[in-house]
């Protein structure tokens, strides 16, 4: 049973979720809203609001290996929209068939609980952003958020190897040359898969590097350009 609170507007569904957990610490809680004014993603990146955007945060049990939780949620988002040809980018971004980002996942730990935050565009009204669907439509955001969160809770992976296999089948940059940058550190090489904790495995002339954090972009070594 999920306690679902849907708001007209809020600064951040994650912040509201933390407030609710202090009042109802033992419950599964879902917070969603029509408009989020200060949503945050990984590395404090801002999620820009649009008419077709969903904003939801909820309590979630960790994956079999906790560091795979965000990766698992990104896979489950693509399975919820099966048939839309969504693809995945390490570590936890969802892209549409046009290779435009349409969803991002943020997982935090507080009060011995994991909190999942999802920002997702059902459709996009801005050129630089993608949507799951091509055309705008009237959407009941409360229902979409409830159905998505319920699907995630009911379809968790029990085996990490199965999760890794599905993730890599949906990864659009598998075996491509990428650059992962984390602050001043960066590594360039072929993305060959996921490690035992969900880290990126990058192969180059120096061997195989394990990268646990950072921002990934495709890299053209001949032009020395990111794209």
Image: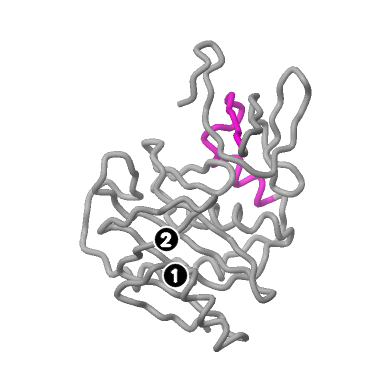
Q: Is residue 17 left or right of residue 174?
A: left
- Residue extending furthest toward the top: 222
17, above or below 129, in the image? below
Dot 2 and dot 1 residues touching (CB under 8 Å): yes
Name above or below for residue 82 compared with residue 143.
above
**Is residue 27 depicted above or below 60 in this figure?**
below
* Residues in magenta, as a range: 162-181
Q: What residue is rendered at 52% in x and 18% in y?
A: 220
Label 1 sits on residue:
13
Q: Secondary structure at mark 1?
A: helix
Residue 176 image point, x, y percent: 58, 26
- Could you say which is closer to the camera, residue 77 or residue 102? 102
In the displayed orientation, state which residue is furthest to the front. 184
Asked if residue 141 lies left or right of residue 58, the reply is: left
Q: Is residue 21 magenta?
A: no
* Element type at mark 2: loop
Which of the colour schemes (rainbow, by chain, secondary structure, one colour) is used? Answer: one colour
**How far apart are the alpha carbons under marks 2 and 1?**
7 Å
Q: What is the crowding at mark 2: few (fewer than 14 residues within 10 Å), some, or many (at least 20)?
A: many
Residue drawn at point x = 69 percent, y = 47 percent? 198
- Residue at the bottom extreme, as displayed: 23
Image spot of residue 218 (x, y percent)? 52, 28
Q: Which mark is residue 223?
A: none
- Whole-percent x and y of residue 107? 58, 61
Residue at numbered disc 2: 39
- The quarter of the image holding the C terminus is top left
């Amino acid at each position: 049973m999920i306690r679902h609170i849907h708001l007209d507007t809020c600064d951040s569904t994650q912040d509201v979720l933390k407030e609710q957990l202090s009042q109802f610490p033992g419950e599964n809680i879902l917070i969603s809203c029509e408009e989020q004014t200060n949503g945050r993603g990984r590395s404090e990146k801002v999620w820009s609001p649009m008419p077709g955007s969903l904003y939801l945060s909820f309590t979630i049990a960790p994956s079999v290996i906790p560091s795979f939780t965000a990766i698992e949620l990104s896979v489950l988002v693509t399975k919820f929209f099966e048939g839309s040809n969504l693809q995945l980018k390490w570590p936890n971004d969802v892209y549409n068939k046009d290779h435009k980002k349409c969803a991002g996942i943020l997982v935090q730990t507080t009060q011995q609980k994991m909190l999942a935050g999802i920002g997702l565009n059902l459709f996009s009204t801005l050129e630089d952003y993608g949507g799951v669907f091509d055309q705008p439509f009237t959407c009941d955001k409360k229902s979409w958020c409830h159905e998505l969160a319920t699907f995630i809770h009911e379809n968790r992976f029990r085996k990490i190897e199965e999760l890794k296999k599905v993730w890599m089948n949906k990864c659009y940059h598998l075996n491509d040359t990428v650059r992962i940058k984390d602050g001043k550190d960066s590594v360039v090489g072929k993305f060959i898969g996921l490690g035992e904790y969900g880290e990126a495995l990058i192969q180059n002339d120096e061997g195989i590097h394990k990268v646990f954090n950072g921002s990934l972009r495709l890299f053209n070594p001949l032009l020395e350009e990111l794209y």
